[in-house]
Image (spheres, rainbow, N blue to C red):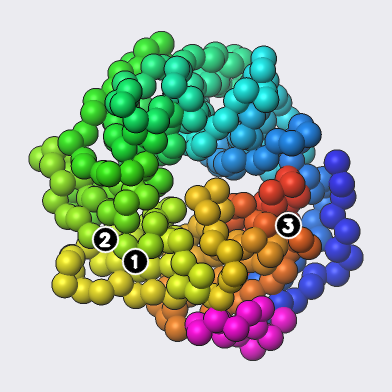
């Protein structure tokens, strides 16, 4: 464990970090690094990487999932190690692509998506005082294509999650009331490449957004069981995020200076996307993920910086701050009071949003 070394809060510089067309930092600091007590590193084995950090709302802790399949519980606000929820028997043979968490009363379920042919979905069921149960599910897949679950996402309905695969298929999964079984349904969503992001929304009805590496984004209506909207992104979409409006979605895409696209579903396909970003020489990739809350969006980058935008005016970047030296920010997570930035090596930085 490494303690945070900042003695005083460091304000974000008013100078831009790059020379992109939309990168203009605010003269009023909007992000400050917080020294904070406690450790600043996730528990990771050698050669392992953080894959996803999830909020366990029932006890205000964080659940960290690594590429090698380790699942840990960290207490907030000091990120103190609490429990090892899963320790795989052969970590170097694991390759976790994504994870999500479901909550039902005092029970939580962490779902892992594995990039392998057999047992592509695994899950841990745990309660505050009654230990952890581990289960696996064989995801039906097109064996003429590559196996593996590339993305998993919690649905709005209780006991339900969605998965997307390297085989271009999207499934909806339902847990039984006792969490002892899980079943899947294949959705008639047509992608021609792997699924990279799934996002449940509710505008006029419950829908599931699926974004594929084929640059196609489909909106599946759960009640009518059909695709009601489809649009194409400029580049491969890595992640889809909710915004303050249920009719608008923010997409992170593979671009060198316009990495983000705001889409209004009601204007498909006539209305073009509002695109913004910053200049970078390397694409983000699908394992770098930002976060949205209210009308704000924060994103990490390969050079260790975190950038903040107000989605009501994306022509100007609200703030930027350097968190890590020579290490990429793999995830930015908004908590009740702060932003947390996680590096590829497992370092953690707390940022206060003013």
Name which of mark 3 and mark 1 comes first in the sequence. 1
Q: Position of residue 153 (x, y in %)?
A: 40, 39
Q: Quadrant of the N terminus?
A: top right
Name which of mark 3 and mark 2 comes first in the sequence. 2
Residue 116 lies, with reference to residue 262, above or below; the image says: above
Part of the protein shown in magenta: 13-27
Question: 353 or 134: nearer the eye?
Answer: 134
- The CA span between labels 3 and 2 is 32 Å
- Give the mark toward the camera: 3 or 1: 1
Q: Quadrant of the C terminus?
A: bottom right
Left or right of residue 209, residue 166 in this image:
right
Q: Which residue has dot 1 on it?
A: 234
Q: Which residue has dot 2 on it?
A: 232
Residue 309 lies, with reference to residue 227, above or below; the image says: below
Callout 1: SS: loop
- The CA span between labels 3 and 1 is 27 Å
Quarter of the image for residue 30 reads: bottom right
Callout 2: SS: strand
User: Taken as a whole, is the magenta stretch helix, strand or loop?
Assistant: loop
Q: Residue at x 65, y 41 (%)?
A: 50
Quarter of the image for residue 208 reads: top left
Callout 3: SS: loop
Pointer 1 with pointer 2, Cβ within 8 A: yes
**Is residue 255 visible from the viewing direction of this image?**
yes
Residue 24 lies, with reference to residue 259, above or below; the image says: below
Question: 187 or 294: nearer the eye?
Answer: 187
């Amino acid at each position: 464990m490494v303690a945070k070394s900042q003695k005083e809060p460091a304000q974000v510089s008013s100078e831009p970090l790059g020379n992109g067309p939309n990168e203009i930092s605010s003269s009023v600091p909007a992000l400050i690094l917080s020294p904070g007590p406690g450790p600043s590193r996730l528990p990771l084995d050698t050669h392992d990487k953080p894959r996803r950090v999830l909020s366990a709302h029932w006890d205000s802790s964080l659940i960290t999932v690594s590429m090698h399949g380790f699942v840990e519980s960290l207490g907030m606000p000091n990120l103190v190690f609490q429990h090892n929820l899963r320790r795989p028997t052969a970590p170097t043979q694991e390759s976790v692509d994504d994870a999500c968490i479901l909550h039902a009363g005092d029970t939580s379920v962490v779902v892992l998506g594995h990039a392998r042919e057999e047992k592509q979905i695994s899950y841990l069921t745990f309660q505050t005082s009654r230990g952890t149960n581990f289960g696996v599910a064989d995801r039906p897949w097109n064996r003429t294509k590559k196996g593996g679950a590339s993305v998993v996402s919690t649905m709005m309905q209780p006991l339900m999650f969605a998965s997307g695969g390297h085989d271009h298929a999207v499934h909806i999964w339902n847990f039984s009331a006792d969490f002892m079984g899980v079943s899947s349904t294949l959705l008639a969503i047509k992608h021609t490449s792997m699924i990279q992001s799934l996002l449940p929304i509710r505008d006029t009805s419950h829908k599931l957004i699926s974004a594929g590496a084929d640059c196609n984004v489909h909106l599946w209506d759960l009640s009518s069981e059909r695709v009601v909207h489809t649009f194409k992104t400029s580049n491969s979409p890595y992640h889809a995020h909710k915004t303050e409006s249920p009719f608008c979605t923010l997409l992170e895409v593979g671009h060198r200076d316009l990495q983000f696209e705001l889409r209004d579903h009601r204007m498909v396909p006539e209305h073009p996307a509002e695109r913004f970003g910053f200049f970078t020489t390397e694409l983000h990739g699908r394992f770098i993920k930002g976060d949205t809350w209210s009308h704000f969006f924060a994103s990490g980058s390969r050079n260790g910086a975190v950038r903040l935008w107000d989605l009501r005016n994306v022509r100007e970047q609200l703030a930027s701050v350097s968190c890590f030296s020579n290490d990429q920010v793999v995830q930015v997570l908004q908590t009740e009071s702060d932003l947390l930035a996680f590096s590829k090596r497992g370092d953690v930085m707390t940022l206060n949003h003013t």
